[in-house]
Structures are given as C-alpha cells and as structure tokens.
Image (cartoon, coloured by chain):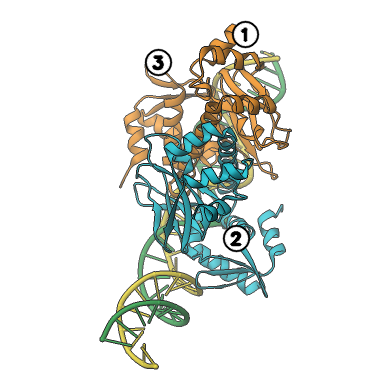
Chain colours: A orange, B cyan, C green, D yellow
Amino acid sequence: MTTSRTQALAGVPLFGGLEEIELASVAGDASVRRAASGRAFFRAGEAATRVYVLVAGRVKVTEVSPEGHEVILRVNGPGDLFGGVAALVDGSEYPVTARALETSEALAWSGQVMLALMRRFPVVAINAARLVALRLHALQRVHHELMTDRVERRIARAVLRLAREAGRRVESGVEIDFPLSRQDLAQMTGTTLFTVSRTLSGWQSEGLVTTARRRVVVCQPERLVRIADDLS
Amino acid sequence: MTTSRTQALAGVPLFGGLEEIELASVAGDASVRRAASGRAFFRAGEAATRVYVLVAGRVKVTEVSPEGHEVILRVNGPGDLFGGVAALVDGSEYPVTARALETSEALAWSGQVMLALMRRFPVVAINAARLVALRLHALQRVHHELMTDRVERRIARAVLRLAREAGRRVESGVEIDFPLSRQDLAQMTGTTLFTVSRTLSGWQSEGLVTTARRRVVVCQPERLVRIADDLS
DNA sequence: CGAGCCTTTGACCTACGTCAACTCATGTGG
DNA sequence: CCACATGAGTTGACGTAGGTCAAAGGCTCG
C-alpha cells in the first residue's frame, strides 16, 4: 500500500523538505519490515545493506564487546532513522544491533537505493548528515556525564530523558512507555542492575517514582531534576 | 592563493568524488583561518556559523559541563572536518570548543555556503553524513569502553589510538606527535591525572613506553595491545 | 502450575578518586 | 645568562562509591 507508506513518511525528519509527490516516490522504493518484541532488525557484524525508518514501536540499539558486555546506545521511537549510519559506508558491517523492545514496524531501503535517493534529492543527504550530527551531540552529552557524574545522577538523567522522549501521562505522573528493566537502565548508564535497583528503591521510598517489573513512572520530575542538576 | 587552497583540499574526505574544477570552485569559497597553539577556532556556545577543514596542525575538540568539567572528545589532524556538525543545524550553537594544540591552519566555509555546496554537489552532503557517521561509531566504541573497562585498559586504548592516528616513528618506537599531558589523557579516558601518572610510570618502569613532559613514546606496542585486549 | 526472569537486599571488598607535599623542567624577563 | 615563577609530573596516605557475589522472594507467561 504505497499511499499508506507515503503517509507514514510525512513528518519524518529524514525526508523533510520533500514534496508530496517526491515522498510518494521515496515510499515506493521502500519495503516494510516488522519485528516482534525481542527480535532484531539487524545484528552487529551483519553486512550493512539497509537503512531503516521506524514507523511504529520501539527499537533499542545496542553494542556488544568481544567480551560479551552489552551496552544500550539509544532507544528509537517512531520517525527515527536507524541503521542508516552504517549502510552509507558501502561494503561495511553494522557496528550495532537493533532489537525491537515491543512489536515494531519499519520502512527499509537498500543502501544503494538510499544513495541514489540522496543524489536525486540532496536535501535527504543533508537531513541525514544533520540527524547523525544530532545523534553525535546527544552521545557526546551522555559520554560527558559518564565521565564526570556519579551514578545516581546518571540514572536520574537517563530516566528523565526516557520520560521526555517516550513518556505517557498517567494519573500518578509520567510513565515510560515501554518495558524497561533495571538491567536496561544499567546498560544505559554504565552501572550494574544492583545499583540501579537500590537507587530506584530509594527514590520510590521518597515518592519520586513508582516502579514495577519493567515499568517506571516518574511522579515528581522536579525532584528528579534536582538530583540530575544538583550544583552542590 | 586559490590554487594552493585547491591543493590543500585534494584528498580531503569531505570532498572526495569532486572533479578538480569543482574542487577549485569549492576552494574559492573558503577562507583561511589560523590559530596559534592554545587559541580556539571556536568555543562552545558561540553561534555555529562556520564549517572547518583542518589543513595543518592539531585541534582538540572539548566539551565543558556547567560545573566546569572539561572532557576531550577528539583530536583532529590534517584533512579532518570539524565544526561542521553543528553549522548544518541552522541557528544553532557549537556544542563544543575547538582549540589548537599547536599552530594550526584550517579552511572555513559559512554554514550557508556549505549548504549551497551540498545542494550543488550532493556527494559532499553524502560524504558529510558518512564522516559524521564514522565519528559517531568511534565515539560509540569509546563510550562502550568507558562503561565496561578498567582505567588501565582505557588509557592503553587511548594511547594506542593516538599513536596510530598521530604517531611518528622515532628510534625507540612511535612518538605521539603533539604535546599530550597526563591531564589530557585523563580527560580523554574519564580518569584523573594522578591515575594516568601512576599508570604511565608503571608502564615506563616495564619498558612499555618512555615519557617526558607532555611527550609519550610507545616502545612496545604489542604489550600495550595485550593490556588493551586482555581477555583474561 | 511451574520455570524462568526480574527484582531486592545484605555483606564484603577494591579500584580509583581525593588531597597534600614535593621535585623538576622550562621559558621568561631582568 | 641566570633566577625565579609557573606549570607538569610524582608519590604517598586515605576514604569511599559502587562493583561483586550470594541468597531468596514474587511476577507472568507459557
């Protein structure tokens, strides 16, 4: 259904600046990929053949070292570009794994097709550069935090970021809208699930958050911000 | 001297794929910027108006937090793009500071001009996306290390990277070819100058490296690699 | 209903940060 | 050209944030 694919692309940053008819052409070149919760769109080490734009769901992007240590670099939501980074470097491999956190759907283009699109519509290439640049900036900030901040602050920042990007209003506050384990938070903040557990327990007993198995609700964002920004 | 500027651009990755005559046109739009050792090409927070390609020297890219903690994100050498990332996001500010480690020279374009170049020569936009992507990958690896590795290994990796990217053969091994203090290494690896000092002292007494004030020579790279990759 | 996950909590330990004191180059100016 | 001020580096003593490991309880989903 090309028309529905075209609609899915409306408002996607990668294609900002394209006319509707151009969008339809771009959509025509796409294929639809789905992944059930826990399944991977691609894994690190595979040939980087495709560029994805997430249409629905959540996808975590992780990197695992030779030793087997896995870290979470980012959680993508609808509209986000992923895999694109590597597919432009031709003949290369994905350096990361993209795994669905819940049932997800994406549009995909082969690297070749995407390169052709970029040559035809330079604005797409410019958008891509800008998007990757923004991602780089975001990672630079997280990296800085990791170098200089204590764990409680890092966890606070991670939770606030997730609430901002993937928050859903509920009675008691803002719930992070996908399953998020202590282990996940640990892999985002460079600590252990034990420390995350202790930290969240502490916050919960102070009323800052309420938690359940793989669920986090931020109840008092401003107090969390105080922890995140504390200048003392 | 447009012709010398054109020569400076030959082989620069950002402009790979351009014809000589196109290169000359690109060079014609550039201005030359110089910075003495210690001076900044731009500082974090300034309006991001220009894109730079380093022609000669070394430039360290740093980020400083509100608390005043400074971390080194990268050291650029000749041919490297810097500042480009932000200048594409129009109306934005540089998120980082670019400071010359030694007397340096760069070519610069305004963001406007660079955008126009990218529209005219889509390959430049594609190159830019690719370059930023590569930088993102590099930062992802470092970030991973910071999350999972002990300091000695991180320092070993940083030293090896610098030797690879900016090494000069000397009698006793490979010297890192720009002034590099313990503090610098600490700000690259997320530790303190004290720990770096102790670590280098240890290595020196084992004959792995020789050091002097702001100078590091790698004498036994393979043993350093053993520390960096130790799978025990 | 049962088998795994996810989570909690406690006890212990250590890698590394912090601070202080000292030495040694270096480059600057008198 | 020497002297001194300054910034780089070293080393020791000490404290602690948070990692590690073990044990056990509770969801949930098959």
The residue closer to the viewer here, B181 or D21, is B181
Q: CA distance from mark 1 to mark 3?
A: 36 Å
Q: Which mark is residue B166?
A: 2
Expressed as whole percent of the image width and height from the top left, the position of residue B206 reads 65, 72
Disc 2 is placed on an element classified as: helix
Amino acid at circle 2: Ala
Expressed as whole percent of the image width and height from the top left, the position of residue A3 reads 58, 7
**Residue B5 can be seen, yes or no:** yes
**Residue A182 can be seen, yes or no:** no
Q: Are marks 1 and 2 in contact (CB under 8 Å)?
A: no
Tell me if mark 3 has few (under 14), some (14-19) or many (20+) residues whose alpha carbon lies within 10 angstroms of its own: few
Task: Let me know if marks 1 and 3 both belong to one chain.
Answer: yes
The residue closer to the viewer here, C21 or B125, is B125
Mark 1 lies on residue: A2
The chain to which mark 3 is attached is: A
The chain to which mark 1 is attached is: A
Mark 3 lies on residue: A170
Residue shown at the point (53%, 36%) measured from the top left: A188
Q: CA distance from mark 2 to mark 3?
A: 53 Å
The residue closer to the viewer here, B79 or B222, is B79
Image height check: is D6 above or below A172? below
Disc 3 is placed on an element classified as: strand
**N-term mark: 1 or 3:** 1
- Tell me how many marks there are: 3
Expressed as whole percent of the image width and height from the top left, the position of residue A179 reads 54, 23
Q: CA distance from mark 1 to mark 2?
A: 51 Å
Amino acid at circle 1: Thr
Disc 1 is placed on an element classified as: helix
Residue shown at the point (52%, 63%) measured from the top left: B196
